[in-house]
Image (cartoon, rainbow, N blue to C red):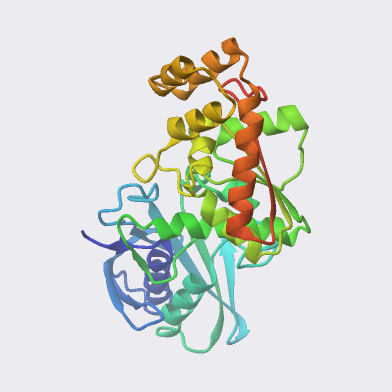
Amino acid sequence: MREGFTTGTCAAGAAKASAIFITSSEIVNQVCVKNLDGREFVLKTFHESQNFFGVVKDSGDDRADITNGVKVLARVEILDGEDEIEFAAGEGVGIVTLPGLKVGVGEPAINPVPRKMIERAVREIIPRKSLRVTVSIPDGRELALKTFNPRLGIVGGLSILGTSGVVKPMNEKALLDSLSLELSMIASLGFRKLYITFANSGEKALRKIFHVASKNVIQCGNYIGHVLDEAVRLNFNHAVIVGHPGKLLKVAAGNFNTHSKISDGRLEALCTHLALMNAPREFIAQIFHTNTTNEAIALIREQGFNNVWDNIAEIISQKCIQRCKSLKVDAIFIDSEGNLL
């Protein structure tokens, strides 16, 4: 599958084109930039306005990348002094407002590797003078609402990202890295107790039922195992997992990646624990042949076996503790309406 360029690579290319323009008045339509390993990227550039030059982001065959096709712009200005390069957030590039990320509070959300790539690119053209590099993504403010940035305390737009300069298709690592970053931010705020939900519905239920108003809530998606492992690494001491049986029953079956292509075992886990409660065989068979966990929830409620959720929550807790050792873990079941099971 075809690789693409990161926003960091695009910003480096745009900055190099701007540096060429302000030193020679030449408008170039192509530049070559290098990543930190020396790999070269040839990028098409265009002149936008006010010394801003741009590169259109090409994510290759990674069509899940929401920044594919956006314009990444950069402008280089020469300042008094020598050797310093400062970075500024233009339109659509976020500002960091919380600690725990790779750049400091108040700084533009331009990660360390893109900063080094940009510096390398502009220093090829302007070796010594102090510079200001402003990076902009015109559509960034709206696109950022579809990313982790609001949860990470990055306001006003997207982050300029990249560790290798390359977008690799089907790259699960980027999502896991985002989860690790969010956990790092939560830890940096001093929290040692962590609330984990699978998605928005779980977080809304958590805040409604338990009145949790703090920033120590993370949505793990399908990657509950990764989040628990990272919680241990970051020295959290207590995790509370809140979720619908459609996800949590998979954890009860010993699965720590809950993607439908990876794992299931929901009904098997549920029926096992109903059997351990001496539920009638006919009822267990009925549960086993339900089409959805919501249907199973309704039947269990009708037959008065709601205690099964308490029993399974205990098993989930035990399985998570066996995996994590030093982390206390509790599990809480909710239904589709956000009510406590």
User: Does residue 124 appear left or right of residue 129 in this picture?
Assistant: left
For residue 271, above or below residue 9? above
- The image shows residue 287 at horizontal and vertical percentages of 45, 20
Q: Residue at x 63, y 21 (%)?
A: 306
Q: In terms of depth relative to the viewer, which is nearer, 286 or 6?
A: 286
Task: Name the residue rendered at 72%, 46% in the picture.
Answer: 215
> Which quadrant is the N terminus positioned in?
bottom left
x, y percentage for residue 151?
Answer: 62, 47
- The percent position of residue 80, horizontal first and vertical second, equals 62, 82
Residue shown at 56% from the left, 22% from the top: 336
Above or below — where is 159 with respect to 211?
Answer: below
Q: Nearer the viewer, residue 69 or 238?
A: 238
Please tell me how many numbered marks the rendered image carries. 0
Q: Seen from this angle, which residue lies furthest top?
A: 302
On screen, 135 above or below 137? below
Question: 218 or 308, which is in the foreground?
Answer: 308
- Answer with the quarter of the image where residue 60 lies: bottom left
The answer to whether residue 195 shows anywhere in this view is yes
Q: Quadrant of the C terminus?
A: top right
Residue 320: x %, y % from top left = 60, 51
In the picture, residue 81 is in which quadrant?
A: bottom right
Foreground pick, 95 / 297: 297
Residue 93 visible in rendering: no
In the displayed structure, would residue 169 be above or below residue 341?
Answer: below
The quarter holding residue 130 reads bottom right
